[in-house]
Image (cartoon, rainbow, N blue to C red):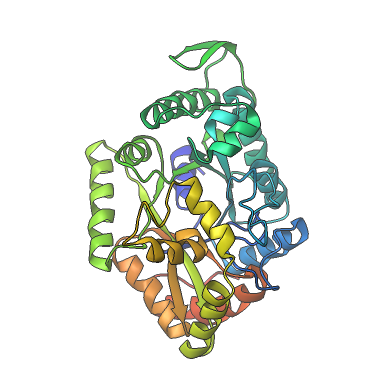
Amino acid sequence: MHKNALMQARVAMRSANRLKLGLFGANCSSGRAVTTVPERWTGSWPDCVRLAQMADAAGIEFMLPVGRWKGYGGDTDYQGTTLETVTWAAGLLAKTTNITVFGTIHAPLFHPVIAAKQFVTADLIGDGRFGLNVVVGWNQDEFEMFGVAQREHEARYAYGQEWLDAVKRMWGAEEDFNFDGNYIKLRQVRAKPRPFGDTRPVIMNAGASDTGQEFAIRNCDALFSTTTRLTLEGAAQRVAAVKQAARDQGREIGVYTVGVVTCRPTTREAENYYRHCIIDHADWSAVDSILAKKHITRASHPAEFDAIRRDQANGMGGLPIIGDPDRVAGDLARLSEAGFTGLALSFVNYVDELPYFCAEVLPRLERLGVRVPKLA
């Protein structure tokens, strides 16, 4: 395959589907559901392998991990047990055939020379199926574990730009080059081998601020955009604006969002299970710990605190997609019609719930014209 065609295939995650689907957060205990129910996700390596192979066989396009170094506490120590994302991706790539597997990388915590080599190694293991999700800053207590100070917001992205520029140069054809940035200074850099097929991994970012969104539009193939508090029309307008901003720079960008799926044979069953897990048995102490790290309290946000708290329990703020297969497929199709390239989905227990989703929802999405049947 020609290099340009191979790169286009990588960005499309080797898929002709108009709506790409992925699984989000499976490398962490409890996944993304802040719940105490006993069937919640383990995040163990054997379960991750089972899930990746199940998703691969079903034609799911990608797996996206959470970059987490320290749990949030609460009754479950929410996300307290996690698998590091680059080695997780490399292992899953060795055990799958078609699915793209991302590493989620806090740029300030990974030296770019080491990081570039790690990414290439994973990419070669997967024959070009490794993806990079860049994060420039997050929880202060996690950074303190590393003895690394958080920069102020704008400087985080300035550093992230230098870091990504350096990594991309190491993926290219230069040898023995110097890199002289304001934050990163490298001498006589040599990095072999190159990524698979002399291309590069697909790159995504989830910057929510104006600066973060500009970073993604300038550098990335995919932007994750939250839709929790938007109408469908508002989401469509945001997607169109992002895509147009990229075209204004001579680039194309995919726009993804996050969905939290509860799918059962009837909508009543789905709603009852959602209430059971996410409301009646939420790990509210963990939810409050997460919000406190963001400086969100009832005192600081009196009018909207309860709504924010419910959103946080629901898959760490993802869009709730609840119902029978027809309703779930319809919701996903409408998001596709709004312009989204794809969704990263989570479940209370991925392995238990994905087979029903694949058996019942995927064929409906094919009939709705947003996905095509998987070739045998």
Q: Is residue 23 above or below residue 142?
A: below
Q: Is residue 190 above or below residue 232?
A: above
The residue that appears at 32% across and 62% down in the rendered structure is: 229
Q: Is residue 158 above or below residue 343?
A: above
x and y, in percent, of residue 113 in the image: 60, 23
**Residue furthest out toward the right:** 46
Q: Is residue 367 left or right of residue 250?
A: right
Count of labels in the image: 0
Q: Is residue 348 left or right of residue 9?
A: right
Residue sitting nearer the eye, 13 or 246? 246
x and y, in percent, of residue 267 in the image: 46, 87
x and y, in percent, of residue 201 in the image: 53, 40
Q: Is residue 242 left or right of residue 110?
A: left
Q: Quadrant of the C terminus?
A: bottom right
**Residue furthest out toward the front:** 299
The residue that appears at 41% across and 82% down in the rendered structure is: 327
Q: Is residue 268 left or right of residue 212?
A: right
Residue sitting nearer the eye, 65 or 200? 65
For the question of whether residue 117 can be seen, the reply is no
The residue that appears at 65% across and 55% down in the rendered structure is: 28
For the question of whether residue 154 can be seen, the reply is yes
x and y, in percent, of residue 132 in the image: 53, 41
Q: Is residue 348 above or below residue 255?
A: below
Q: Quadrant of residue 307?
A: bottom left
Residue sitting nearer the eye, 33 or 9? 33
